Amino acid sequence: MNVLEQLVAVSLMNFHNLGRRLDSSLVAVIGFAGVVLVVVAILSIRAGFHATLAITGSPDVAIVLRGGAGSELNSVIIGNKSFTVGQAPGVAQDQNGAILSPELLVEINLKKRGNGLPSNVSFRGVTADAFKVHSKVHIVAGRVFSPGMNEVIVGADAARLFDGVRFGDVLQTGRYHWKVVGIFDDGGGLHNSEIWTSLPVLQGAYNRGNSVGAIYAKLTSADAFPAFQQFLEHDPQLNVSVQRESDYFAAQAESLSLFIGIVGAILAVLMGGGAVFGAINTMYTAVAARTQEIAMLRALGFGRAPVLCSVVFEALLLGFVGGVGGGVLAYLLFNGFEASTYSSLAVIAFHFAVTPHLLAWGLAYALMMGLLGSILPAVRAVRLPIAASLRQG
């Protein structure tokens, strides 16, 4: 019998006897599953948040901010810079000229529905061209606000999350009252958590004169961005920075992604260490229960390698079962789960995303924990003295 045949025979015998060690095996499986469930659930927050911002950003839309500003909230562009931006190469045109959207973003305080806790919400002033630049935005209830009127449209997620902003409500912020005349959706992106109104009305309400926070420009294609960026950033009279909209929103997610990644790594190491110790204990128990069996196999001529590999394969099987179980539970419990978080001081609604990549990572991590948990017991199994082991029992 060659080495491969020995390995198959020993492994089949090993798996056949798993029922005798069911309790200890279940402990290891539950440990692996628990680690995968928790870590995948945490990392699905980052995946869902990234997905929301990725939906929002488009590579053929550019955002123009004041030079040195990190976000729209701390960017102030004074005067009619839209004309100069519209002269840049690569800007898409329609019958009315350059497709641009000057926008002002302020933060207002609203109470979250259910718990009444105060939260910051993005209040955005836009013009009619905003719907050409942000092409995914569409009205799902009511109508668009009338220019010059204290009317707002509310993102679908904001309407669900906050009090006083449902269709037909009157939103009160400060000394101003705004009638909610419509609900809009942008396909699950960041704007779903915002409130929109007419730009001149918002400028007047917050004493912003003719200033805006950003100018969004629709480009003829994603390839037109370098020339557009170079033209504006090399104009000394403008003092602006230019980014792709997709890159801008990806950068807004970096701090949260880093934090979640660190937390996920710490939990993976700590909980994974506990699961590995559980696997080591389980496999030591398995080796101890099979002492005579292993010695008999060795006496019949079975080599060390098949015995060692059979112990490793058993641990990998337990890791596989635990990894699959933990991944399935994570998907069923958390995929699509609605949550909200802060980015640039405002609340953003998003959904947990248990992606195939995360499930594959969780399964690989469970297999790695099983492998680490099997090494010492496997080495012990092949070092058992044959004669002494046969005399036991």
Image (spheres, rainbow, N blue to C red):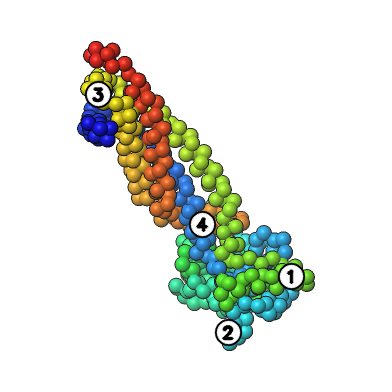
Q: Residues within 10 Å of mark 2 (few under 14, many from 20)?
A: few
Q: Are the residues at dot 4 and dot 2 in contact (C-beta closer than 8 Å)? A: no
Sequence-wise, the earlier of marks 1 and 2 is 2
Task: Please state the horizontal and vertical placement of residue 73, each as a whole percent of the image.
Answer: 66, 62
Q: Residues within 10 Å of mark 1 (few under 14, many from 20)?
A: few
Q: Nearer the viewer, mark 1 or mark 2?
A: 1
Sequence-wise, the earlier of marks 2 and 3 is 2
Q: Which residue is mark 1?
A: 234
Sequence-wise, the earlier of marks 1 and 4 is 4
Is residue 295 visible to the viewer in this orientation of the structure? yes
Residues at marks 4 and 2, CA–CA distance in whole angstroms: 32 Å
Q: Residue sitting at 47 percent across and 74 percent down?
A: 139
Left or right, 217 with respect to 295, comes to right
Q: Amino acid at mark 4?
A: His
Toward the front, the furthest residue is 2
Residues at marks 3 and 1, CA–CA distance in whole angstroms: 80 Å
Question: Can you say which quadrant of the picture contains the N terminus?
Answer: top left
Q: Secondary structure at mark 1?
A: loop
Q: Which mark is residue 94?
A: 2
Toward the bottom, the furthest residue is 95
Q: For this rendering, which residue is in front, 364 or 91?
A: 364
In the rendered view, tell whether residue 337 sits above or below residue 273: below
Task: Please state the horizontal and vertical placement of residue 10, each as a whole percent of the image.
Answer: 25, 30
Q: Secondary structure at mark 3?
A: loop
* Residue 304 figure quarter: top left
Q: Residue sitting at 41 percent across and 38 percent down?
A: 368
Q: Residues within 10 Å of mark 4 (few under 14, many from 20)?
A: many
Q: Residues within 10 Å of mark 3 (few under 14, many from 20)?
A: few
Q: Are the residues at dot 1 and dot 2 in contact (C-beta closer than 8 Å)? A: no
Q: Are the residues at dot 3 and dot 4 in contact (C-beta closer than 8 Å)? A: no
Q: Which residue is mark 4?
A: 50
Toward the right, the furthest residue is 237
